Amino acid sequence: FFQAADGIRDKLVTGVQTCALPISLAALPVDECADAIPEELRKQARGLMIILELCRHPLDRAQQERVEEYAFALGGDGPGLTIVRNLVNGGTQVAAADYLRHFDEEFAPTAQAPAGDVRAVAPILDEGDLVGLEERVRAQAPGTLGAEFLAFCETNGFPVATPETEHATTLVPHDMCHVVSGYAATPEGEIALGAMKLAVSDDEYHWFEFLGNLAIHEACIFNALGYAQAEPTLARPGAIEMMVAAMNRGRATARDFSRADFLGMLDWQLDDVREEFGVAPR
C-alpha cells in the first residue's frame, strides 16, 4: 500500500525511505493524528486502516477498537468501520449482509446522497441495453472490445448476459473492466482490478467496491452468502506485488474507464479503448 500511495506515505510517515521490509515505526498517538495528517488525506488514511484491518487474520476486538480510535480521531465513521465491527461482533453472515445493505442504500442509481455529499453511483446498465448483446459481440472483428469481451466470457465459462441474467446490469460493466485492464477473473485479478480502479478515481463507490473485493477474496466473509472463496488471497505468491502494481497502473491512467460507454465501443479496437482512457500497459 505504501509503495503505491506515495503522496499519502510521504505525509503520513516523515523520514521513512523506501527499503526492504520489515520497517519498525513508532505508533503515532491518537490525539496527534488530526494535526499530523492533512484534511485532504484523512479519508484515504481511514480507508487504508480499514483495508489493512481486513487483511489481518484473525480479526479481534482489540484490533477493531484500535482502528476505531484512529478513524474517529481523523473525523469519520462510515460503512467500512460498520462492516468490520459486524465481522468481529456478529460473524461473516452479518457483515456480508451489511455490505449489501450499504451498497443498495448508498450506491445504487436510485440512492440519495447525503446533503452536500458527492457520491458516484455504481456503473449499472439498463436491462434493455442487454437485448441482443451476444449477437452484437459475435459480429465484431478480431481485436475489438466486443470480440475480446466474448473471448473473456468463453474463457471463463460465462454466458453472455441477457436481460434475464441475474445481476447482469452490474456484471457486464464489471467484466468489461476486466477486459480493458487485462486482469483475469481470478481472486488475484479481482483484487487487482479493484485496486486499479480505486487509484484511477478515489471516489466513494470505488472505495466501497475495493472493500468488497477484499471482503470476498481476502477476509472471505461472503462465503456465508454462497461465494466459494474460503482462503485468503494476498498470501499467495505474487498477489501483493500484483495489487501494488495495479494501484500504480491506476495512478498512471488518465481517466476512469469503469464508467465508459462500453456498449457503444464494441467495434473499437481494444488498444484504441485503452488509449482513449490512458490505460497503462501491464
Image (cartoon, rainbow, N blue to C red):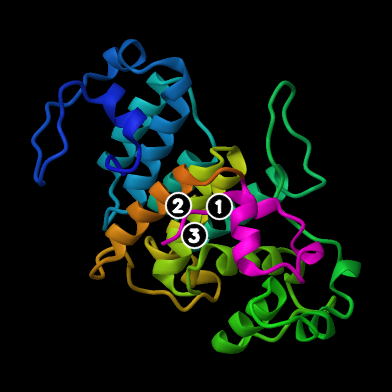
Identify residue for label 3. Answer: 193
Quarter where residue 170 is shown: bottom right
Disc 1 element: helix
| Residue drawn at x 32%, y 54% as measured from the top left | 55
Along the line of sight, which residue is nearer the eye, 24 or 18? 18
Give the image location of residue 52, x and y in percent. 32, 46
Q: Residues within 10 Å of mark 2 (few under 14, many from 20)?
A: many
13 relative to 133 in the view: left or right: left
Under mark 1, the amino acid is Glu
- Magenta-span inclusion, residue 65: no
* Residue 8, disc: none
Disc 2 element: helix
- Image height check: is 46 above or below 201? above
| Residue drawn at x 50%, y 55% as measured from the top left | 194
| Residue drawn at x 28%, y 48% as measured from the top left | 60
Disc 3 element: helix
Q: Residues within 10 Å of mark 3 (few under 14, many from 20)?
A: many
State yes or no: discs 2 and 3 in contact (Cβ < 8 Å): yes
Under mark 2, the amino acid is Ala
- Image height check: is 213 above or below 7? below
State yes or no: discs 1 and 2 in contact (Cβ < 8 Å): no
- Image height check: is 179 above or below 150? above
**Residue found farthest to the top:** 35
- Looking at marks 1 and 2 on the same chain, the residue that comes earlier in the sequence is marked by 2
Give the image location of residue 282, x and y in percent. 41, 62
Identify residue for label 1. Answer: 209
| Residue drawn at x 76%, y 64% as measured from the top left | 265
* Separation of residues labelled 2 and 3 (CA atoms): 5 Å
Give the image location of residue 272, x and y in percent. 64, 61
Identify residue for label 2. Answer: 195
* Stretch of the chain drawn in magenta: 256-282
Quadrant of image for the N terminus: top left
